[in-house]
């Protein structure tokens, strides 16, 4: 199965019966990001977290809709 990265538009091959391929076929809205872009985003996120202006908004404990 051929997939295209949504960020760099690089076309890669994924095994047709892998879990990733199954999820991409099942949920058409789900997007594919290549490993290079994934690593780049992770590295930049860690750099932003070291900044003192970074705020991590976490969900409150428990379900507020109960």
Image (cartoon, rainbow, N blue to C red):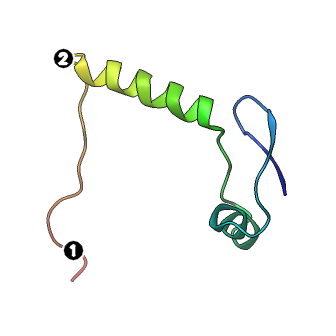
Residue 39's spot in the image, x, y percent? 51, 30
- Residue 9 placement, left or right of 35: right
Q: Which mark is residue 63?
A: 1
Residue 29: give its label: none
* Residue furthest left in the image: 61
Q: Quadrant of residue 10?
A: top right
- The residue lying toward the viewer, choosing from 11 and 41, is 11
What residue is pinned by disc 2?
Answer: 52
Report helix, strand or loop for mark 1. Answer: loop
Q: Earlier in the sequence, mark 1 or mark 2?
A: 2
| Residue 11 point in image, percent of width and height | 83, 38
Q: Position of residue 38 (x, y in %)?
A: 55, 35
Q: Quadrant of the N terminus?
A: bottom right
Residue at the image point whose x is 21% and y is 74% from the top = 63
Q: Residue at x 14, y 64 (%)?
A: 61
Quarter of the figure that contains the C terminus = bottom left
Residue neighbourhood size for the residue with mark 2, other residues' Cα within 10 Å, grouped as few (<14), some (14–19), many (≥20): few
For residue 7, above or below residue 43: below
Q: How many marks?
A: 2
Q: Residue at x 63, y 67 (%)?
A: 19
């Amino acid at each position: 199965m051929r997939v295209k990265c949504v960020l760099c538009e690089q076309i890669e091959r994924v095994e047709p019966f892998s879990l990733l391929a199954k999820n991409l076929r099942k949920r058409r809205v789900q997007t594919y990001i290549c490993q290079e872009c994934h690593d780049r985003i992770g590295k930049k996120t860690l750099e932003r977290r070291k900044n003192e202006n970074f705020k991590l908004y976490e969900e409150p404990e428990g379900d507020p809709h109960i």
